[in-house]
Image (cartoon, coloured by chain):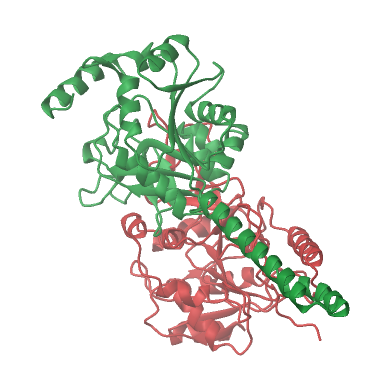
Chain colours: A green, B red
């Protein structure tokens, strides 16, 4: 905006009316208004877009029904429901503007409200956590750029990992999804429940598999190779999360039974961070005891 | 005056819309090896057709026009027959003198050269070698020969050196490396067209259905692709795996025709990938490549894209003198001379 171009027509008027002082006042007012508007606009824009993808929300999808472990989110771990422990850890993450629980069950909703969590009710027909997160984030009034899908059955998730994947997505504009990996233990190499991951030179995921990758000519695990285990924490670009449930299942995803392959097969990019985290998922009632002993041992209440 | 350089360099931001960088004028083919004359077998290329390239260009032109740019084209489409080249190399630790081995009366290299000449996307076929015996043999049956140094570590390096020695400039180099005497010219054409239709890929190659008995053979390299036939990964282990850990008889696993063909663009125009053929041998080895012992992983780990076509081709590698006999019997059986 050029104040002079605005002023020029009026200055020709004022010179014809013969009052230079008036012209200067008009100039002054216009310039002043322009400066105020510019400062205001800059301030507004700065406040809104300090960083790319700056607004992040953590969502803990929780389902009551389960084939292996009914009512899992509410199971008691050293005195607190598992979902509460997960929620408390998620609240410690510094990059999340908000943490909510998304559930389809009133019992879980009540339990969460009692310890102070925000709850969003979602439909029972959600087939997986990502769909539930997608539905939940669209019910919110506020707009978010990043949605972190925090699995409710990892009560020992470190807040730093959540922050790590959020930041990864903030500095990688061409990725729509980010996740974390941790070193794979050699004894898990041929365990198909442990998902392995390979990445390229820049940390973009190349593939995820239940089989050992990378493989080698001998067919045995190489004790010197730094294999990577995929952790279940996921962070999505919000726009991508909205269209993600609508993507058709893809061949490799169905064969391996790994959701993240749908993203790769559709040509999108996944950013991966490496962390050191002992995965302690709770899948069965036995896992509860294991985790309680671990927590007592490590003096975590 | 219209320029032969591409005037467009649009980056369209969805995963499979391709930036139009490449002005594909000529293809250069460098097959290496030994292919006896055989009738073509079934070939099912994926979307390798020049019409899709035209669609991409039409879209790019429309975008440019919308933005207010004038567009001029002076592309020559793949229908014209560009020059091609060919490379071969002599060193083989298991079978000395492999390219010259006699298969039903003709040296393997001659059979290969004759088949490469049948590929329609190629203009010029040349043999690149470091050995005088091979060079003489090839000149004997009428092939053009380029001498290259012994220090080339693999086919790509040899192609790279050979291409630089040529006066003419090429956009695409096809390396057919190998001990696969029964390669079909249609496969060569298929991978050339695949690369022409995928300007964002720097490499294209072919896969064929994997036989279930080869699922756990680490010498058989498996390949997986995304929805648009860009390679995701290559592995000596079974990919995709599944929860049971067993091979799934219903799943269409794919075998990489690894010692076969690859196509690399090597244009001297200013397109962004024009130097990939020179870059490629210089890239540092990468972790997955070293662990799996698969060259093509170096490309993926450096973030480049590989386009894949699906064909039906029974692999008949010639690695040992015994393989020669097997091949000769097969050819007699199928009445091929």
Does residue B237 appear in this view?
Answer: no
Question: Can you give x and y, in whole percent of width and height, for residue A199 in the image?
Answer: 39, 52
Image quadrant where one finds the C terminus of chain B: bottom right
Question: Relative to residue A111, is residue A53 drawn left or right?
Answer: right
As drawn, B334 above or below A231:
below
Question: Can you give x and y, in whole percent of width and height, for residue A221 in the image?
Answer: 25, 45
Question: Relative to residue A36, is residue A197 drawn left or right?
Answer: left
Q: Which residue is more in the foreground, A233 or A228?
A: A233
Question: Relative to residue B95, is residue B36 drawn left or right?
Answer: right
Does residue B291 appear in this view?
Answer: yes
**Residue at the location (57% across, 75% down)?**
B274
Image quadrant where one finds the N terminus of chain B: bottom right
Residue at the right extreme, as displayed: A16
Q: Which residue is more in the foreground, A276 or A157?
A: A157
As drawn, B15 above or below A163:
below
Residue B247 occupies which quadrant of the picture? top left
For the image shown, how many numbered marks are present on the structure? 0
As drawn, A14 above or below A146:
below
Question: Can you give x and y, in whole percent of width and height, for residue B45 in the image?
Answer: 66, 53
Question: Can you give x and y, in whole percent of width and height, for residue A190 in the image?
Answer: 29, 36
As drawn, B189 above or below A138:
below
**Residue at the location (43% across, 53% down)?**
A204
């Amino acid at each position: 905006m050029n104040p002079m171009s605005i002023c020029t027509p009026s200055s020709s008027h004022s010179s014809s009316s013969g009052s230079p002082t008036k012209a200067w006042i008009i100039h002054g007012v216009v310039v002043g208004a322009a400066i105020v508007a510019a400062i205001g606009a800059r301030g507004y824009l700065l406040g809104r877009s300090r960083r790319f993808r700056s607004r992040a929300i953590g969502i803990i999808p929780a389902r009551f029904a389960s084939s292996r472990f009914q009512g899992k989110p509410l199971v008691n771990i050293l005195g607190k429901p598992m979902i509460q422990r997960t929620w408390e850890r998620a609240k410690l993450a510094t990059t999340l503007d908000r943490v909510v629980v998304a559930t389809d069950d009133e019992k879980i909703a009540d339990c969460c409200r009692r310890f102070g969590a925000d709850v969003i009710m979602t439909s029972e027909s959600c087939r997986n956590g990502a769909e539930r997160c997608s539905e939940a984030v669209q019910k919110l009034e506020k707009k978010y750029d990043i949605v972190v899908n925090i699995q409710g059955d990892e009560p020992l998730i470190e807040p730093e990992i959540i922050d790590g994947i959020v930041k990864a997505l903030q500095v990688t504009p061409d990725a729509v999804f980010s996740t974390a990996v941790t070193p794979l233990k050699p004894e898990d190499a041929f365990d198909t429940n442990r998902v392995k991951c390979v990445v390229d030179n820049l940390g973009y995921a190349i593939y995820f598999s239940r089989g050992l990758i990378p493989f080698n000519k001998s067919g045995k695990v190489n004790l010197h190779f730094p294999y990577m285990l995929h952790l279940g924490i996921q962070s999505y670009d919000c726009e991508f999360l909205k269209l993600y449930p609508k993507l058709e299942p893809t061949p490799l995803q169905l064969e391996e039974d790994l959701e993240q392959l749908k993203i790769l097969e559709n040509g999108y990019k996944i950013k991966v961070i490496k962390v050191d985290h002992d995965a302690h998922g709770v899948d069965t009632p036995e896992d509860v005891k294991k985790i309680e002993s671990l927590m007592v041992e490590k003096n975590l209440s």
